[in-house]
Amino acid sequence: MTDGRINYDPHFKPVQNIYEDRLRQFTDTGGDYHDLNLTKFYDKQRISLDQNHVKVEWYQVPFEKGTSPVSPDKRPSWASIISQDKKGELNFQPAHKGQPFGPSWSTTWFKVHLSVPQEWVDTQIQLVFDFNCNNEGVVIDPDTLLPATAFSGGERREYLLPKQEDGSYFFYIETGNNGMFGCGAGSTINPPDDNRFFHLDSADIVLPDWEARSLYIDFWMLSDAARELPGETWQKHRARQLANDVMDMFDPEDRQSVVKCREYLKKEYFDKYTNDRAVYFQGDQNQLTNAYGIGNCHIDTAWLWPFAETKRKIVRSWASQCTIMEEYPEYQFVASQAQQFKWLLENHPKFFNDVLIPKVQEGQFIPIGGSWVENDTNVPNGESLARQFFFGQRFFLKYFGFKSDVFWLPDTFGYSSQVPQLCQLSGLNKFLTQKLSWNNINSFPHSTFNWAGIDGSVLLTHMPPGNTYTADSHFGDVLRTSRQNKSNEVYGSGLMLYGKGDGGGGPTREMMEKMRRIRSMSNKNGNVIPKLQVGTSVDEFYQDILNRTDNGEKLPTWEGELYFEFHRGTYTTQASTKYYMRKSEVIIHDLEWIATKASILYPDTYQYPAEQINDLWENILLCQFHDVLPGSCIEMVYKYEAVPMLERVVEKCSDLIKETVEFLSQSEKNSATTPIATLNWVQNDIPKEMSSEFNAKVEDIDGDFILSNGKLCVRINKKSGSITEIKDVQTETEYLDIKHGRNKIGANQFVLFDDKPLNWQAWDTELYSVNQYKYLQDIEKVHITRDSADECSVEVIVKVTNGCTLRSTISLKKTSFETQNRSKIDISTLVSNWDARNKFLKVEFPVNVRNETASYETQFGITRRPTVYNTSWDVAKFEVCHHKFADYSEYNKGVSILNDCKYGFSTHGNLMRLSLLRSSKAPDAHADMGTHQIKYAIYPHKGQLSSDTVKLAYEFNYDNRYNVPTTVIEPFKDIINITGDENVILSNIKRGEDDISLKSNYTLETKNEKSMIVRVYESLGGESRASLLTSLPLKSVTKIDNLELKSLEDCKFFSWKTKNHLSEIPITLRPFEVASFKLVFN
């Protein structure tokens, strides 16, 4: 018996790739079928710029070529423009579509009057103003001066018009004539085209079809599931079939078919909450959440645009986010960098107080990070890193009432081994970055882990598995967050950081809608589609890690620096900025040293300049932003902003020191003066007579110049200009080796490397360049320039190009019996008219040392790195960062190279190499061109690395002397001193920030006390003991955190009945510990 079925209508099996490829047709805005697919129904009606319903006028802010593009007149305040317009003082003219506006970096204002047809108003449909001038802009209310939303072309061009019964609207739009990524010529990271113009493509009022636009999001996410889910899953094939069903069901002649398509998809693949925040409360609550979505808008404080433009990017971006929060209550947005909040407060106080602060209080807008800017952590010194957190966290506490516990640093080019300790001391115990996903040699093995610094301090660290902080909330972004998690065995969830970034912008309405759809699909179809959660905060995410990993104990640990295997050229690019940064860090140290002591000795007559010092620190910290100090910004940032700013810091610090010295002179009128140093171990009295056997001398022997001083003998070849011998004349120890290795010429030998990276010119120098080099041997002159018992010098003149020469002066000073073991060779090199293209200038030192590691000074300590190429991890460190010194030692001897402004270094085999200058051509076409003065020194020493190197490197940099009255020398010294293990360094002093007499702008709770903060650290990696000494009567001593807010330990102190009535504070430091002590005086 049969069922009687006969086949009259055979069906075929759909061909997967054809049916999948077809899907893009449905939402294609171009091509042959755009008027036959869904795009036809996005708008019900649209009225373009007609100067009737849509009236737009424009005004160009004057922009004279050749003037500074960052001066305030180029970006006048909103209030001034609107006030002038209301007075009829500005000439606004009618605008038309296609009209160009510019040039680059100028400002154009638009005045917009809309008259919406009454029948549109009566529909009660949300109306839209579509504006696209292909530049950056912001809508401004003419009465409140509050921003509504931003425009940036492309993804951000619609302003949702507020309900208005009469359909009449009036508002301003301020636009900056640059794109989100500046004005790069041809490529965003090329030098800017300063004559770009931006065209007005649209200024339309729109009556949208919101159902059609919603179907677009439905279909987009569905078709992504069809394309991107694994082939063995039924969910993938079902998604493809349903998407094809929708295309078959859709009728381009019937708008109602859109509703039919949406209802079909809700029934078959989505749940019923696709347009509702409730979607995040549905589904299996016991199922692991694969991805937690957090909105962010990474705004580079400067990069392909100047600081001046960033100030506008902030208000554009954050205004848009506050507007989106009104529509999407589940939305949480994080923003870092206290500097950016301060700029917003200064320029737009009403928006800051009336709009942003309420969103912070509601928990939707979340300040995070705890640092002043998202700073570089390679080049700034230890005190700078400490102050990043000091000012960042205190700003957050002052204006938001809380501090962050997450150090938020997604885009910096490597992470110092002292970051964990400084974070912990600043109230931060968690860390987020993702930049190591860019490594170009090794894949970093963890997503969630404990990061331990060189002192052992630990940060709970998460690296978003999607490997980006600018996810578009695509289905693929969620899928990658789930699939690429490298820590699934211990923690299977990951953060997905979504939102347009680098140039600002942040999340869009479209992203919020896409995420609702993705969660809806997961609710309906199971965990093959990753579970995405929106509405969970960053704090809650990290707490979930702790809950699931036994408070982090089950997580793997990474010890030491997080070395970034990319962007190694940033240790050297933009030499002038790095030079002035070092000088700024040194002189503000000196200012705080002398001002602290003066204010404590003369409390009634000298006012500690707290607010001025804080302002100077803010400028220093701003210039440590992770594109500015590393050298990867466009030229105008350095020419008009960073370098002049740091020059002013040096100048202002010098002025304040001068004022303090004058005050001291007035207070001690009958006293002579004595030069004083700001390092506690440097003697301030006049040196005694030295034995003539240690005098410096220079001789011409056998065609070589010989410098000697009774301790060292330095031979300079008159033909090559290189140092061919450095010998300890007492022990006959030779410190150079020119018999082996690739440099058989000598030390202080200049080398020119080819420097053509695969990409990212200012950022990168590549491995292959290590073997593409030539020694500079066109020697024009080698001659004696100084011959005295105090110092002897030989100058070597080297031709680099027809227009560029090097003048390198090698000097040896006299020494003494007591100081002979600290004798060094000083070198000062003047590079005149550096004019190279894609070359890297370095100087080499072939040394008679063999070891598998070398030591490089980092913040408050040292980092040891390989000198061998055993593994790919070793190979990756072919260029590394250091601070004031690099040391290469074996058991009995070693060589330290000191410097006054350089950061790139490498040591391999028997060759030490200091990086001097690069010549990249993008994004700054003139980076490093010009003349540079560089100082460095060779310190050959007995035994391994010791405190002698550490202190000599300090002295080489902190070499300023200040003529103070001789009568204050001893009191100054006795205010604070240190004795004990030589490797314990007293690095900085300052006044307690909350002392009532300071009237500091960063005071949080004034205290009626006179206090001093003393920062010390253990510099070489061993538990150590020392004692702080002071001659002033003590009330209390506490070990405190970096923020000066939390007491970590009450310290004992003992007073001695000596001539100076000294009090002693014994301290013990673990290896590489940084400790701050607060001394409160009676």
Image (cartoon, grey):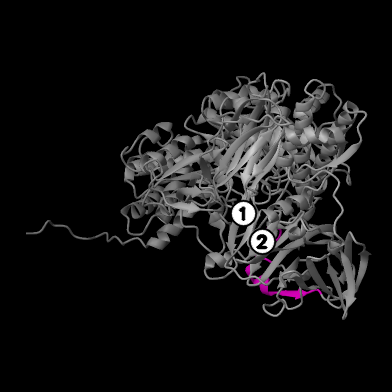
Report x, y in % for residue 373: 65, 40
- Tell me the tag on residue 887: 2
Q: Quadrant of residue 1037?
A: top right
Q: Which residue is mark 1?
A: 862
Percent of width and height locating residue 502: 63, 46
Describe the element under mark 1 as helix, strand or loop.
strand
> Between 657 and 212, which is closer to the camera in this rendering?
657
Circle 2 SS class = strand
Asked if the stretch drawn in magenta spans residue 758, the answer is yes
Task: Please count the marks in the image.
Answer: 2
Q: Is residue 197 visible?
A: no
Which label's residue is closer to the chain start, 2 or 1? 1
| Amino acid found under the numbered disc labelled 2 | Asp
Q: Are marks 2 and 1 in contact (CB under 8 Å)?
A: yes
In the image as oriented, which residue stretches furthest toward the left?
1
Region in magenta: 757-776
Q: Residues within 10 Å of mark 1 (few under 14, many from 20)?
A: many
The residue lying at 90 percent from left, 75 percent from top is 700
Residue drawn at x 12%, y 56% as measured from the top left? 3
Q: Is residue 333 left or right of residue 925?
A: left
Instruction: Give the percent coordinates (x, y) of residue 1026.
Output: 61, 42
Q: Looking at the picture, does residue 972 appear above or below residue 232? A: above
| Quarter of image, res 595 | top right
644 or 957: nearer the eye?
Answer: 957
Q: Is residue 137 visible?
A: yes
Image quadrant for the C terminus? top right
* Percent of width and height locating residue 878: 62, 66
Which of 861/203 is in front?
Answer: 861
